[in-house]
Amino acid sequence: MKIGVDQITVRNGEQLIAAVTKAFAQGDHVIDFTGVKVIDSTALAVILAAKRVLKTDKTLELQHRPAQLDSLIAAYGVQSLFS
């Protein structure tokens, strides 16, 4: 699923979580961050929502990850969820 916005923040988090949850429930397993320029911790909530509904035969794939995402993952100490 291509995120399709340039920011992932608390302002659009609920809509993105709903969209990702729907896409992943239908079998998607990719989050494409192309064009995303600004993120906050809401991005982690979006990814974790996707992981919760991910089909068991699929592996979560994060494409075009913003550098900020890796910083957030490290800051929150959740590296083991993304290895």
Image: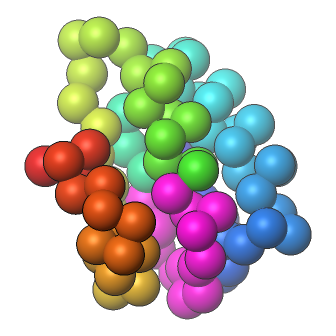
**Rendered location of residue 14, percent (x, y):** 81, 49
- For the residue pair 42 and 2, the one nearer the viewer reads as 42
At 22% from the left and 57% from the top, the residue drawn is 79
Would you say residue 45 is visible in this rendering?
yes
2 is higher (above) or lower (below) than 9: above
28 is higher (above) or lower (below) than 76: above
At 29% from the left and 11% from the top, the residue drawn is 56
7 with respect to 70 (left or right)? right
Query: Most extreme residue toward the right, as rendered?
Result: 11
**Rendered location of residue 20, percent (x, y):** 61, 39
At 72% from the left and 72% from the top, the residue drawn is 9
**Magenta-drawn segment:** 32-44
Would you say residue 69 is visible in this rendering?
no
The number of discs equals 0
Query: Most extreme residue toward the left, as rendered?
Result: 83
Reply yes or no: does residue 75 show up in magenta.
no
**Rendered location of residue 76, percent (x, y):** 40, 66
Can you tell which quarter of the image residue 42 is in?
A: bottom right
**Rendered location of residue 60, percent (x, y):** 30, 38
